[in-house]
Image (cartoon, rainbow, N blue to C red):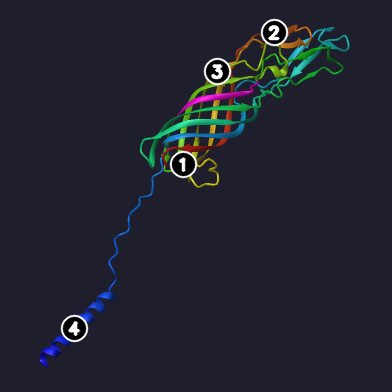
């Protein structure tokens, strides 16, 4: 009897212990830690930009006046002296837009120094007002005669740069300086000037700086499924040498090709100087 009671008590205790153990929380394995990727600017990129360019020279904007003697074959009107007056604006202002490609290398992902290079090609709308002039009242240009500003104000169809970049990044924000080689061409044929063409190639240098910020790869701007999309604001100063072969020319005959030099004007080789302020978007390819 005693043995039967002992066995019954033991069985009951074991059943109660099992039930209590079932009520205890189960031990789960610790969650797997997945580190958040640290952004780096290292990688190739390509993009486009648009902005505005304007004159950055220190030259005087005074009007240019050419005096014509009485009976000049360049004009028709009374037999009296006359004048051709050209505006003093440099005409270096207008829309600028184009594209760029480049590569960055960041020494320490997250925050740190960034070096790189960039090349761009830009359309530019310069020289629209170059040849605006006024004649003495009651005078008009003679047949086939066209006038051109004798100081040789510049015009460009396009320009481009090849630059180095050096900056410092705080995670997705990059401040940088940039500088290097610049080139440009154009601004002749549309004015009808003889011995000039839109292939008048010029070279020089450029310097500037900017601010760039990286968006996430799932940004609505990421049309090309790149690893990141960056937006930037940039300013550049551009200095190009200028061919001086038409400086001093103020009139020509479109039918015969005859040219006329303005008295007292000599050929000068003033550089083309302008600044560009632009915004752009880049698509970065490579590491996160």
State yes or no: residue 157 in magenta: yes
Q: Earlier in the sequence, mark 2 or mark 4?
A: 4
Identify the secondary structure beneath mark 3.
strand
Label 2 sits on a secondary structure element that is loop
Q: Residue at x 73, y 12 (%)?
A: 250
In 3D space, how far apart are the residues under numbered discs 3 and 2 (Cα atoms)? 29 Å
Numbered range of the magenta stretch: 155-165
Q: Which residue is mark 4?
A: 11
Q: Position of residue 254 (x, y in %)?
A: 77, 11
Marks 2, 1: nearer the viewer: 1
Which of disc 2 and disc 3 is earlier in sequence? 3
Judge the density around disc 3: few (<14), some (14-19), many (≥20) Cα neighbours within 10 Å: some
Question: Position of 195 compared to 30: left or right?
Answer: right
**Callout 3 touching callout 1 (CB < 8 Å):** no
Left or right: 217 in relation to 269: left
Q: Nearest to the eye among marks 2 and 4: give it.
A: 4
Name the residue: 25% across, 75% down. 21
């Amino acid at each position: 009897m005693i043995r039967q009671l002992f066995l019954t008590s033991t069985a009951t205790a074991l059943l109660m212990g099992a039930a209590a153990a079932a009520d205890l929380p189960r031990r789960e394995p610790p969650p797997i830690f997945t580190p958040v990727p640290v952004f780096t600017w290292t990688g190739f990129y390509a993009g486009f930009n648009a902005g505005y360019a304007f004159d950055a020279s220190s030259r005087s904007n005074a009007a240019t006046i050419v005096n014509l003697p009485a009976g000049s074959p360049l004009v028709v009107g009374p037999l009296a002296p006359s004048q051709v007056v050209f505006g003093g604006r440099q005409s270096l202002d207008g829309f600028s837009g184009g594209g760029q490609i480049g590569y960055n290398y960041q020494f320490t992902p997250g925050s740190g120094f960034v070096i790189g290079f960039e090349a761009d090609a830009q359309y530019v709308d310069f020289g629209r007002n170059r040849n605006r002039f006024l004649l003495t009242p009651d005078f008009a240009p003679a047949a086939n005669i066209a006038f051109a500003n004798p100081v040789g104000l510049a015009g460009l169809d396009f320009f481009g740069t090849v630059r180095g970049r050096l900056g410092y990044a705080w995670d997705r924000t990059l401040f940088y300086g940039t500088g290097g080689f610049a080139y440009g061409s154009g601004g002749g044929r549309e004015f009808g000037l003889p011995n000039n063409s839109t292939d008048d190639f010029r070279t020089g240098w450029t310097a500037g700086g900017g601010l760039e910020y990286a968006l996430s790869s799932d940004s609505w701007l990421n049309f090309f499924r790149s690893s990141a999309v960056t937006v930037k604001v940039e300013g550049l100063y551009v200095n190009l040498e200028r061919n001086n072969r038409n400086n001093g020319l103020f009139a020509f005959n479109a039918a015969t090709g005859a040219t006329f030099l303005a008295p007292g004007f000599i050929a000068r080789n003033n550089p083309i100087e302008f600044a560009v302020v632009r915004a752009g978007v880049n698509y970065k390819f490579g590491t996160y």
